[in-house]
Image (tube, grey):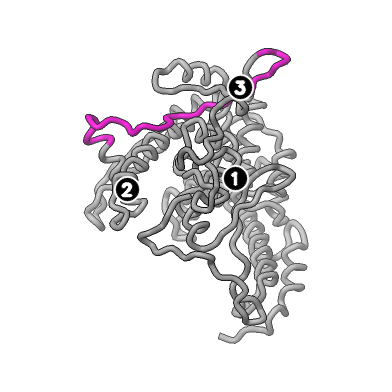
């Protein structure tokens, strides 16, 4: 295959993609081998904007077909022309019909200003209740998907008129579970959907059982995370006499408004907004314990007395970090990591701990990833090590200590 000279298409492609709503989309193929990170980032950005514009064009065409005929005809045509599944076609038609009623969102998508997934979130939210479309489009232009999803959920609750109870009730009604035997592999497949509260609770219980199994494993013959997850679920269902593993079942968070002397901003540990009525209901359940603590009085500074984080520390970390600081994995699947490694004298103190999932933990210990705290927000992040193969051709960095796969240590 013959490619044009490197970078020759960047200016023209950018002009074409950024020409505004209704412009054609043209990204020429180039040989990306050997291009710098800056050039590759620019190209990925251009392709992303082009994908948004194409998604808008597709949505407009699908919505017009549905308008001329009906949703059933539109689904059939999408399946035939795109060779997609019935489920995917139905999803495309629903999204197209919703976007057709959202002028600001449709224009931003057609201009390549917001990603397709952000636009679909706005479209889906518009069918659940009132939204401030202009505010959401503005946020969609600036925030990544995880941040935007939280912004949208918070706005939905604020505008719901009932503190989000109707939304939560619809989610509960939409719960579903399906198990079937795969004809291809002969194995059973289980898929399920739960409302945020039930899902968070189930995930925490399963994750606690996984940690229990991990602690009992032979370090030299560990299961894969996927195998351990399947075994944890099977044991909880098939061997209930063993009971749930010890650990935090569900963390509910609320702020105390000193002026009004009442709780406010109820949420799950990952920031998912929660109606106050639901918080009160859950607080009365026997196996869920809302924790109210003062970081100055709780025993969150354990020094070198113990290596693993206490329950109080884990709760504090879940509230502060909300997710894995590296990849955004849910807190129930995270370890408490010592910023200053335990083996290097790091204390088991709250300020020296962060939440990381298993993969990100290995990135830090095995591959030299760094943890840093943003000075403005106080949020912790992970960063890859300096480029081991810079343009000069010399290696400027190597891991200080490369652990063997079966001797990985957690710090």
Q: Range of the magenta residues?
A: 236-261
Q: Earlier in the sequence, mark 2 or mark 3?
A: 3
Q: Is residue 328 above or below residue 319?
A: below
Which residue carries the number 2 mark? Answer: 228
Q: Position of residue 153 (x, y in %)?
A: 61, 34
Q: Which mark is residue 303?
A: none
Q: Does the segment drawn in magenta span residue 241?
A: yes
Which residue carries the number 1 mark? Answer: 146
- Provide the secondary structure element on which disc 2 rests: helix
- Provide the secondary structure element on which disc 3 rests: loop
* Residue 349 in which image quadrant: top right
- Write the residue at 44% across / 27% down: 173
Q: Earlier in the sequence, mark 3 or mark 1?
A: 1
- Write the residue at 31% across / 51% down: 227
Which residue carries the number 3 mark? Answer: 163
Label 2 to label 3, Cα distance in Å?
38 Å
Label 2 to label 1, Cα distance in Å?
27 Å
- Is residue 164 visible in the rendered structure shown here? no
Q: Is residue 307 above or below residue 45?
A: above
Q: Does the segment drawn in magenta span residue 344?
A: no
Q: Position of residue 104 (x, y in %)?
A: 73, 44
* Residue 148 in which image quadrant: top right
Foreground residue among 172 and 384: 384
- Write the residue at 57% across / 19% down: 276
Q: Mark 2 or 1, which is nearer the eye? A: 2
- Graded by Cα atoms within 10 Å as few (under 14), some (14 to 19) or many (20 or more), the crowding at tag 2 reads some
Foreground residue among 249 and 21: 249
Label 3 to label 1, Cα distance in Å?
22 Å
- Is residue 157 visible in the rendered structure shown here? yes
Q: Is residue 175 above or below residue 99?
A: above
Q: Earlier in the sequence, mark 2 or mark 1?
A: 1
Foreground residue among 323 and 307: 307
């Amino acid at each position: 295959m013959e490619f044009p000279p490197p970078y020759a298409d960047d200016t023209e492609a950018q002009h074409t993609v950024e020409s505004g709503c209704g412009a054609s989309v043209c990204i020429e193929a180039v040989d990306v081998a050997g291009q710098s990170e800056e050039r590759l980032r620019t190209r990925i950005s251009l392709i992303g904007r082009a994908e948004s514009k194409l998604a808008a064009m597709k949505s407009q065409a699908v919505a017009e077909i549905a308008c001329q005929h009906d949703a059933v005809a539109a689904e059939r045509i999408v399946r035939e022309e795109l060779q997609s599944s019935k489920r995917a076609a139905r999803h495309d038609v629903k999204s197209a019909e919703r976007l057709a009623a959202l002028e600001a969102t449709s224009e931003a998508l057609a201009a390549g200003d917001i990603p397709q997934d952000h636009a679909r979130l706005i479209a889906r939210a518009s069918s659940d209740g009132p939204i401030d479309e202009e505010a959401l489009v503005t946020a969609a232009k600036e925030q990544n998907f995880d941040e935007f999803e939280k912004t949208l959920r918070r706005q939905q609750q604020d505008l719901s008129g009932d503190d989000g109870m109707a939304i939560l009730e619809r989610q509960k009604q939409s719960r579903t579970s399906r198990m079937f035997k795969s004809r291809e592999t002969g194995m059973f497949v289980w898929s399920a959907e739960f409302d945020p509260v039930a899902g968070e609770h189930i995930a925490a219980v399963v994750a606690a059982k996984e940690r229990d199994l991990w602690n009992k494993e032979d370090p030299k013959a560990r299961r894969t995370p996927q195998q351990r997850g399947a075994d944890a679920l099977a044991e909880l269902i098939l061997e209930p006499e063993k009971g749930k593993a010890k650990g935090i079942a569900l963390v509910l968070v609320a702020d105390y408004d000193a002026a009004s002397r009442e709780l406010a901003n109820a949420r799950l540990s990952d920031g998912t907004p929660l109606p106050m009525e639901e918080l009160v209901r859950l607080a009365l359940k026997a196996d869920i314990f809302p924790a109210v603590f003062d970081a100055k009085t709780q025993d969150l500074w354990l020094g070198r007395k113990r290596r693993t984080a206490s329950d109080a520390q884990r709760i504090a970390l879940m509230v502060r970090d909300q997710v894995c600081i590296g990849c955004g994995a849910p807190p129930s699947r995270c370890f408490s990591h010592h910023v200053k490694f335990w083996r290097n004298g790091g204390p088991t103190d709250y300020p020296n701990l962060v939440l990381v999932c298993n993969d990100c933990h290995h990135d830090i210990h095995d591959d030299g990833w760094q943890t840093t705290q943003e000075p403005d927000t106080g949020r912790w992040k992970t960063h890859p090590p300096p480029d081991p193969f810079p343009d000069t051709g010399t290696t400027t960095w190597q891991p200080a200590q490369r652990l063997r796969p079966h001797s990985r240590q957690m710090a």
